[in-house]
Image (cartoon, rainbow, N blue to C red):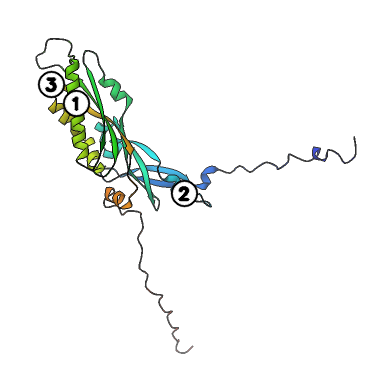
């Protein structure tokens, strides 16, 4: 073997081992804030890598979607089957301000509603609110037995189902087009649209378990901070205030000590 060749044999690997750095040491925690329409404003916390060079932390947070149970937002276990989607719209200090971005049912709730010996009726419609949000609403309903009915089944005829579906669409459009997104969400929480559909279709065929089971946002208007602050209401905690600092006070003159 020629002298001076294969010098690398004695030395270690080229480049050496990189020191393992904990990725969490470069991240910050932010608080997620829900809109004021919900009883509980603190949704939870989220992580993001600190601002470094051109990668700004707040940009990494914007448009994140969080899925939260309505039971947690309303502090009421009766709403546990609804899931609310909230989208991060703006970052203020260590707070992430979110807005409504959709609603869904838990799978187990939907499964529990579907039973034999009844008709399932579904309808969906695309609507535009007064503040230019385009939503797709999905409605679900089931036929129910009339009082003192002896027959085991309660199937609706296809013509009745068509009539009910038409009524559903009509009510959903009327309810959504007459208000903005904030008011519409307040209609979803107590299921007032479902109750109205149930009442309106009573003459065609009696219904039960009428719900708006899903809401998708298809198109949102351009981001407006003023509108977002309106949705968050009296939002003032943890944002921080600008203090008017008085002009620098002149340094106190040293006092002479007598007899020094």
Asked whether the beta carbons under mark 1 and mark 3 sit within 8 Å of each other, the answer is: no
The label nearer to you, 1 versus 2, is 1
Q: Is residue 143 visible to the viewer in this orientation of the structure?
A: no
Seen from the viewer's position, the closer of residues 3 and 62 is 62
Residue under numbered circle 1? 166
Give residue 193's quadrant in the image. top left
Seen from the viewer's position, the closer of residues 111 and 156 is 156
Residue under numbered circle 3? 204
How far from the left and from the top, in percent, is residue 3?
90, 39
Choose the circle earlier in sequence order: 3 or 2: 2
Q: Is residue 101 visible to the viewer in this orientation of the structure?
A: yes
How far from the left and from the top, in percent, is residue 16?
70, 42
Residue under numbered circle 2? 57
Choose the circle earlier in sequence order: 1 or 3: 1
Q: Secondary structure at mark 2?
A: helix
The residue shown at (47%, 90%) is 259
How far from the left and from the top, in percent, is residue 54?
52, 51
* Residue 203 appears left or right of 217: left
Q: Secondary structure at mark 3?
A: loop
Label 3 Cα neighbours within 10 Å, binned few <14 / some 14-19 / many ≥20? some
Quarter of the image with the N terminus in it? top right
The residue shown at (37%, 49%) is 90
The residue shown at (11%, 13%) is 149
């Amino acid at each position: 073997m020629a002298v001076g060749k294969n010098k690398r044999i004695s030395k270690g690997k080229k480049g050496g081992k990189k020191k393992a750095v904990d990725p969490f040491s470069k991240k910050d925690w932010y608080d997620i804030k829900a809109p004021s329409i919900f009883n509980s404003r603190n949704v939870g916390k989220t992580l993001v890598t600190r601002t470094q060079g051109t990668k700004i932390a707040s940009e990494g947070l914007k448009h994140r979607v969080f899925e939260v149970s309505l039971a947690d937002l309303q502090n009421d276990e009766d709403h546990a089957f609804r899931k609310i989607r909230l989208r991060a719209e703006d970052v203020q200090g260590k707070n992430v301000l979110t807005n409504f971005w959709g609603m869904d049912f838990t799978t187990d709730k939907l499964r529990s509603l579907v039973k034999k010996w009844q008709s399932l009726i579904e309808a969906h419609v695309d609507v535009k609110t007064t503040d230019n949000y385009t939503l797709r609403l999905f409605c679900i309903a089931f036929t129910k037995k009339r009082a003192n009915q002896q027959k085991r089944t309660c199937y609706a005829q296809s013509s009745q189902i068509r009539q009910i579906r038409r009524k559903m669409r009509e009510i959903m459009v009327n309810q959504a087009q007459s208000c903005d997104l904030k008011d519409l969400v307040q209609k979803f929480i107590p299921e007032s649209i479902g109750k109205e559909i149930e009442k309106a279709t009573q003459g065609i065929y009696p219904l039960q378990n009428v719900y708006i089971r899903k809401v998708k946002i298809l198109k949102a208007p351009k981001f407006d901070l003023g509108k977002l602050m309106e949705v968050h209401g009296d939002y003032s905690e943890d944002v921080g205030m600008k203090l008017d600092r008085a002009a620098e006070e002149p340094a106190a003159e040293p006092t002479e000590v007598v007899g020094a």
